[in-house]
Amino acid sequence: MTQEVKRVESAIEQAQQANSCAIVSSGDPGIYAMAGLVFETCKLKNIAIASPVACGKNRAAEAPLVVEVVPGIPALSAGASLLGAPLTHDFATISLSDLLTPWQVIEQRIEAAARADFVVVLYNPKSKKRTWQLERAQKILLKYRDAQTPVGIVVSAMRDNQQVSIVALKDLQREYVDMQTTVFVGSSASSRYLDFMVTPRGYAKKYDIGGKG
Amino acid sequence: MTQEVKRVESAIEQAQQANSCAIVSSGDPGIYAMAGLVFETCKLKNIAIASPVACGKNRAAEAPLVVEVVPGIPALSAGASLLGAPLTHDFATISLSDLLTPWQVIEQRIEAAARADFVVVLYNPKSKKRTWQLERAQKILLKYRDAQTPVGIVVSAMRDNQQVSIVALKDLQREYVDMQTTVFVGSSASSRYLDFMVTPRGYAKKYDIGGKG
């Protein structure tokens, strides 16, 4: 964390010296990642920044610092694509890291998302030091979801040591999970079909598929 | 909708005739998009498919049909990047389209996400025929969020007619919103800084920024 703050501060200093400077982040820099810290730091240090696009105005020319966020493919998209299509309907994305967020807030969110039948995407499920949070999340989810609910586990999506598996919610603890893992807990509508985890697009059936073709 | 079903059925027929076939979808095909329909259709028609990556097995060679989902940049990432960094913390993604989902289910999700202080990303907020859902969502959100909560509105992200604006939650109805729009409602921690909408990474302050450095 300290290192991330240093990287951002150093990038801002570079930019203030009229150098173009990019901060590179894996996945999407805007989802649980570095983009937020850039703006937080500028705000706290009272540094004037402008967006090249926001609010229909192009003030880039007159602003001392222009900040542009370039989106990437977030872990939730990369992971979902490897599992099949678990995110074709509403989902809630929750980080299990309680380093910067009280566990009580996290637990309330898991409870709310479970009760309202969202597909739940868990970021930062486990680290060497944080080992009990995922099991606690599983227990809350099991209050509202069937024990057989499919759970997709994607370790290091699109990297050399990628691992993809689909298990029943009750068996989640058997699987290998680390900091580079994203966990997808199905809604009541999600199911497994062969190698894939799928959430249908709706609850109603207003269109006809599977008929005579 | 009917056309989407036809596109998928036609692609599957092509693939069954041993032709490689791609279905192209804007944004990320796995988020409220075509990937789900491919799997739903295969399941309902009992078509055997295999993943080139899932479950650690490479069964591509022996499977009659191999389905690979290639992830893209979802509207939530593209929109967030144009707004600043609204998704640096937990968020819930909800479609306001009640074509395939009963409105009651959607409303329960908005309520749950609002109460648990998620940033809320609204897909399909409005169409020519669906005009009242966004106002209803706003009313529910106002029960739990301050009237001044920043809301980011991104119309046609990364396209020619792109529009980006940030308004207070109470003023949401004044803004232009259509089917190509994604709406980002801040959590209690989100704020506006100059051109940008930002959600900080945590509630606690365990690291020091904005000091003398």
Image (cartoon, coloured by chain):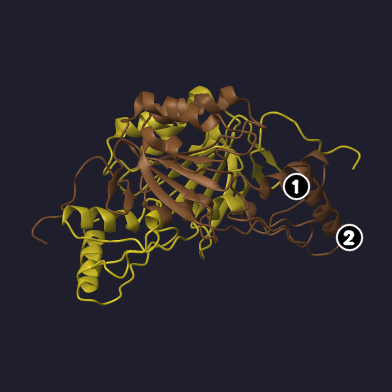
Chain colours: A brown, B yellow
Q: Eyeballing the image, is B17 above or below B4? A: below
Q: Mark 2 points at which residue?
A: A17
**Residue found farthest to the front:** A174
The three-letter amino acid code for the residue at tag 2 is Gln
Report the Cα–Cα distance between label 1 and label 2: 20 Å
Residue in view at x 57 percent, y 36 percent: B186
- Crowd tier of the residue under label 2, counting other residues whose Cα lies within 10 Å: few below 14, some 14–19, many 20 or above: few
SS class, disc 2: loop
Question: For this view, does B135 lie left or right of residue A128?
Answer: left
Numbered label attached to residue A91: none
Above-or-below relation of B26 to A138: below
Please state the chain letter of the residue tagged with numbered disc 2 in the rendered image. Answer: A
| Amino acid carrying mark 1 in the image | Glu
Query: Which residue appears farthest toward the left when viewing the image?
Result: A212
- The quadrant where residue B135 appears: top left
> Quick one: quadrant of the C terminus of chain A?
bottom left
Which residue occupies the foreground of this view, A16 or A51? A16
From the top left corner, tell me how far across and down residue A97 is, in percent: 61, 35
The lab-note entry on whether marks 1 and 2 share a chain reads yes
Q: Residue at x 83, y 64 (%)?
A: A19
Q: Where is residue A23 in the image (x, y as percent from the top left)?
A: 72, 57
Q: Which residue lies under the disc numbered 1? A: A4
Left or right side of A52 for A120: left
Image quadrant for the N terminus of chain A?
A: top right
Q: Mark 1 lies on which chain?
A: A
> Residue B115: horizontal and vertical position, in percent?
49, 24
Where disc 1 sits, the SS reads helix
Q: Which of B134 and B74 is in front in this view?
A: B74
Res. B29 image quadrant: bottom left
Left or right: B160 with respect to A115?
right
Q: Compare marks 1 and 2 and give the one earlier in the sequence.
A: 1
